[in-house]
Image (spheres, rainbow, N blue to C red):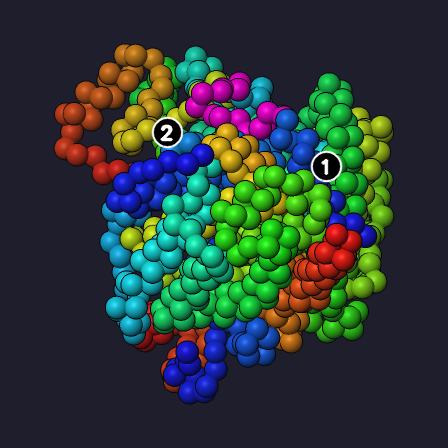
Amino acid sequence: MTLEKHGENRFVVPIGPQHPALKEPGHFEFVVDGEIVTGASVRLGYVHRGIEKGAEDRTWTQNLYLMERICGICSHIHATAFVQGVEKLAGVEAPPRARAIREIFAELERIHSHMLWLGVAAHEGGFDALFMYSWRDREVVMDMLEMLSGNRVHYSANLIGGVKYDLTPDMMDKIREGLNYLEERLAHYLDVVNNDETFIGRTRGIGTMTREQAQLLGAVGPTARASNFAYDVRVDAPYAAYAEFPVEMVVAQEGDLHARFVVRILETMESIRVLRRIFENMPESELVTRVPRRIPAGETISRVEAPRGELFYFIASGGGEKPERVKVRTPSLCNWGTVITLAVGHKLADMPMILAGIDPCFSCNDRLVMVKRNRQDPQVWTWADLRNYGIEYYR
Amino acid sequence: MNLTIHPLIVLLFFPGGLFLLASGLVFQWADRKLVARFQNRVGPRFLQPLADVLKLLAKEEIIPEGAHRGLFVALPIIALAAALTAALYVPMFGVQPFFSFQGDLIVTIYLLSALTISLGLAGANSVDRFSLVGATRTLTQLFSYEAPFLLAVIGPALAAQSWQISKINAYAGETTWFIVAQPIGFLVALVGLMGKLELPPFDAPEAETEIVAGALTEYSGRGFALFRLSKDIELVIGLTLVAAFYLGGIANPLDFVLKTGGLLLVMALLQTAFARLRIDQTVGLWWRVGALMGLVQILAILAGIYIRQWWL
Amino acid sequence: MSIGSMIEDLIKSLFKKPVTRQYPFERQPAPERFRGKLHWDPEKCTGCQLCVKDCPANAIELIVIDKVNKRFVMRYHQDRCIYCSQCVVSCRFKCLELSDEEWEQAVTNKKPLEVYYGKDEDIRFLMERAAAQPVESPCE
């Protein structure tokens, strides 16, 4: 079939917004020649929720929970990034124990996120056994998080100036026990990823990205680290308690899908090690410091390492109870360029795995982009304009 | 076992027709349940496959714009008919095949291929990108597994000196199991069967993460139900054929249940243990390894036959 | 290099019970810190309205009948609540609590999700007042 719309003789395979490969809405068009992909494009924006604008209408405390809801998988890290920015503006620092607990939540979240990804990526490659097993074992982390905070997904552990939940020694013992089991299982999955012939056939040499490409395309997180681009906010600009309890950066040389699997699994094991270290030397202090309801005027940026890469917040305060502007740059957004570039030249069958390889989070991506197209004034769109635009677009 | 039943009953109820359809659903359930248990899951309930089929039959069938209407409706029927006909030459449920003649092995294999071809045609006929890619892959896969599978099935036929399934079945029951004498052939036949049924890891033609449902993407309602039923029946026939040839023949219903069940267990394990192969990897595997192994087996059998003749 | 590295797991699983918890038939208690339905103790409340201010979902309304005699009624919109427990943290008099037992809260209509807390006579008073007045506009 040809797409007359493009006026060319091209066979385009669309993936999304509804497609079994992606459980979240995003639209990709792959131009194929037989099974070989010769061009790729991406269109995002199906779940735009106007969170940045919404933040301007809520108090600092209320925003904490709004930011948590940008992403379901890395909810804690979003709130942490926001809360750290606000604390910086207010000129306070969370007590040491609170910072350690933030790190504990962040690392537990990383474990659950990476295990979720492991399953999804294996499923995209048709390896359902690994998918089912990694998700089964992920339940162990989910149970830990539920025990700590009462919730499986939105832990809401952060407060401005500290955290809500304390860890009892009893809980630490339970978590240690779970971590032992997880470490054993992860070692086994690493073995499967490294040695299974059929799986290696689908991952090794697929979607290879060089260090230069990673730098040029602005890749972040495990995607970049798998291409030997050593950059991790936890190491380069420690926040929370990462200065006291440092993590070791995991990098790989190859830059292909297989390296991304290895980097993520090793990172998970590193998280387990750092958690054990925190439990041994848990600092003693109160959990919250007082922060005024009105945050002094100023601007700040806050960076954290989300499971998918560097998460960046810009926060501006006008000195009131509400922020003046909050700008969020999520890691998935930085990594899309790599997908579009790497897709070309690969087989159609590799597309889902390359897509999943960056661990995309679609809800994190949604921005409204205005494209100047035959319009005099692109700044103000009335309801009628938007409606017409929509009708025109889908005609 | 040898029964004499009225041909109409044979065609409509036992062992053709209804009974065959029911056994197809049971095998589908067993396969899904086993895969689920291998993955530490619960799996579907016993009546789930039946419920699926009934639901699909009750649903509206949507014929996509631009597709050839007649062909779109006819292809699922042809597929099911081919599968049901093929069953008549195979010792289903341990009962002697009701129609049998010299060379029915070739006919059966052709009928099973007809199913795959109608699947490919159905994909090419429905005007859809996913269907077209799926159809291309289905037919590519057909060309890759067919030759090794045929070579693997010919092995016991050569040894039994017959092209008649019932005779090979009887012969297999008398001698040592062919799995011992021709282990390579058994392996190729079993894996070839998985390729034929498009089971993982050979499910590139219907890889849902890439091309939705492959050739059947545009099928809904009745057409989809018929295609699924014919695949289920193909599963039963394939298992019966391999069990009859390599596992010492099928002489009675108990034999049938035990042997096909055992084969299904192995197949379910193989289904879950691997990552999906890309279509180029599938083709490479079959022609570089499968066909070669099949040929080696055939040569070994021929050599064996000559040596025995020379010996005697 | 090996083929089928997971076969051992698979075969072991065949002889194990599936890990799936068949929820409505097999129930597990919620963890101690579970955040379920909100409960309010009218005795301790001073009517400072902090919980109302901090609630990110506008799920709490504190209706003041008589501030001096501490007559308050809390209207809790459970359908809006996101169970973040910010109100519990904000309350300086510990009169709010999220239940760890009431967590199967799905209903087919929204009526029971609007909950009134307070002394009986206060709620009755409020209802009578609402009935006497023309339809009160829903607070958004």
Q: Are marks 1 and 2 in contact (CB under 8 Å)?
A: no
- Relative to the observer, which residue lies in front, C9 or B291? B291
Q: Is residue A199 left or right of residue B154?
A: right
Residue at position x 44%, y 70% in the image: B132
Q: Is residue B187 magenta?
A: no
Task: Tell me the crowding category of disc 1: few under 14, some 14 to 19, or many 20 or more residues within 10 angstroms, Cα based.
Answer: few
Q: Is residue B136 visible?
A: yes
Task: Return the mark for residue C8.
Answer: 1
Q: Amino acid at mark 1?
A: Glu
Q: Quickly name the residue at label 2.
A: C106
Q: Residue most toward the front?
A: B312
- Relative to the observer, which residue lies in front, B162 or A28? B162
Q: Is residue C22 magenta?
A: yes
The boundaries of the magenta stretch are C16-29
Q: Position of residue C93 (x, y in %)?
A: 53, 19
Q: Earlier in the sequence, mark 1 or mark 2?
A: 1
Residue at position x 82%, y 56% in the image: A251
Residue at position x 83%, y 62% in the image: A253
